[in-house]
Amino acid sequence: MAQRKIPMRKDIVTGEMKPKKELVRVVKNKENEVSIDPTGKKAGRGAYIHLDVATAKKARTDKTFDKAFGLKIDPTFYDELVEYVDHQVARAELFGNGK
C-alpha cells in the first residue's frame, strides 16, 4: 500500500517545517480581523504556529503575528492563543493526540 503524503507547514515563530496536525492556524480575514482557526478552513491569510506553550509565549513577546500580518494586534489575542495552545496540549496528553 502506498504511503500517504503528510502535509507540512512552516511554524512562523521557529521557522521549522512540521506536520500540519502539530500546528494551529491563525487567520487574518478581509476585515483585518485576526483569529484562531481550529478547523484550518477559514477564508483569509493564514500563518501557523506549533502547538507548544513556549512557542506561543515567544510569539506573544516577539509580536510575531503583528509582523506577519502587518497590523497592530490586540494583546488579548496573544493571551487567547497561549490559552488555546495550552488547552490543546493538555487534550493531546489526555486523549493521545486526538485519535
Image: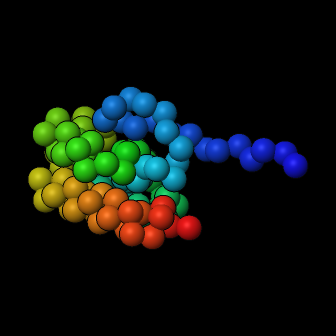
Answer left or right for 68 relative to 5: left
Compared to residue 18, the image places residue 15 above or below, namely above
Q: What residue sits 16% from the left and 58% below the top?
A: 79
**Exactly how many numbered labels are in the figure?**
0
> Is residue 11 visible in this depiction of the protein?
yes
Name the residue furthest right: 1
Name the foreground residue: 54 vs 71.
Answer: 54
Q: What residue sits 22% from the left and 56% below the top?
A: 82
- Which percent across, then down, holds residue 38? 43, 63
- Which percent across, then down, holds residue 95? 45, 70
- Name the quadrant containing residue 6: top right
Compared to residue 66, the image places residue 84 above or below, namely below
Compared to residue 80, the image places residue 26 above or below, namely above
Q: Which scheme is used to colour this image of the protein?
A: rainbow
Q: What residue sits 18% from the left and 46% below the top?
A: 57
- Which percent across, then down, holds residue 40? 49, 58
Compared to residue 63, the image places residue 20 above or below, namely below
Name the foreground residue: 24 vs 77.
Answer: 24
Name the foreground residue: 7 vs 43.
Answer: 7
Name the foreground residue: 91 vs 20.
Answer: 91
> Is residue 63 visible in this depiction of the protein?
no
Q: What residue sits 53% from the left and 44% below the top?
A: 19
- Which percent across, then down, holds residue 56? 25, 47
Q: Quadrant of the C terminus?
A: bottom right
